[in-house]
């Protein structure tokens, strides 16, 4: 009996420690930086916000259209990611990147884009294609 109580206590302590490591704080849209609010109203006008989480200095906005938008502490977008098969808008993406995808992948659409140190990683909806561009929007390679 004593071993069972000790085991259960250890399990409970482990669960509490694990849950306390989750730094995500649910916030309201009003708590987002102004730049983030402008981005959402410009590129996702009329789309409801399901949930906003703040983790350290970043914000993660989950939209009703199954797209997640991540922002840094200044409110600049750092990633826009649709669930599988969901097409994201392209109005905020460098025109050079949009033109390249339109030219080279005519029957495909953007599923996600992420800002990286080197530039941008782009995921397309069909074919599990990941494209890499530099900061100026020049195509670099296809990521395997």
Image (spheres, helix red, strand yellow):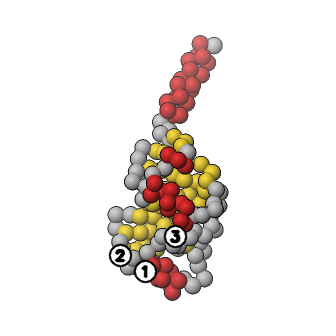
Identity of the residue drawn at 47% across and 36% down = 21
- Residue that carries the numbered disc 1 in the rendered image: 96
CB atoms at circles 1 and 2 under 8 Å apart?
A: yes
**Mark with earlier residue (3, 2):** 3
Mark 3 and mark 1: span between their CA atoms?
16 Å
Instruction: Write down the quadrant of residue 67 in the picture.
Output: bottom right
Closer to the N terminus: mark 3 or mark 1? 1
Residue 116 in the image: x percent, y percent?
38, 63
Which corner quadrant of the image does residue 128 belong to? bottom right
- Per the image, label 3 sits on a secondary structure element best described as strand
Q: Position of residue 100 (x, y in %)?
A: 47, 82
For label 2, the SS is: loop
Q: CA distance from mark 3 to mark 2?
A: 18 Å
Image point (53%, 73%), residue name = 90
Q: Vertical placement of 23 versus 110: above or below?
A: above
Q: Spatial distance from mark 1 to mark 2, Cα to Cα?
A: 8 Å
Q: Is residue 139 above or below residue 2?
A: below
Asked if one can make out residue 81 in the rendered structure from this viewpoint, the answer is no
* Residues at marks 3 and 2 touching, judged by CB atoms closer than 8 Å: no
Q: Is residue 15 above or below residue 92?
A: above
On residue 123, the disc is: 3
Circle 1 — which element?
A: helix
Q: In the rendered image, which residue does mark 2 sit on? A: 136
Q: Identify the residue at image location x=59%, y=13%.
A: 2
- Residue nearest the viewer, comparing 12 with 91: 91
Percent position of residue 134, x then y: 36, 73
Name, please, the residue furthest toward the top: 2
- Depth check, mark 3 against mark 1: the one in front is 1
Of mark 1 and mark 2, the one earlier in the sequence is: 1
- Residue at 46% x, 54% y: name it: 34
Label 3 or label 2, whichever lies nearer to me, is 2
């Amino acid at each position: 009996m004593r071993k069972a109580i000790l085991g259960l206590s250890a399990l409970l302590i482990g669960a509490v420690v694990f849950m306390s490591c989750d730094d995500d704080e649910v916030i309201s849209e009003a708590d987002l930086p102004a730049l983030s609010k402008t981005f959402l109203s410009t590129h996702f006008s009329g789309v409801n916000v399901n949930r906003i989480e703040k983790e350290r200095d970043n914000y993660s906005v989950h939209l009703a259209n199954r797209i997640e938008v991540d922002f840094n502490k200044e409110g600049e977008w750092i990633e826009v990611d649709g669930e599988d098969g969901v097409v994201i808008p392209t109005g905020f993406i460098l025109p050079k990147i949009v033109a390249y995808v339109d030219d080279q992948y005519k029957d495909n659409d953007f599923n996600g884009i992420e800002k990286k140190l080197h530039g941008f990683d782009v995921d397309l909806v069909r074919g599990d294609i990941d494209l890499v561009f530099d900061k100026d929007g020049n195509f670099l390679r296809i990521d395997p």
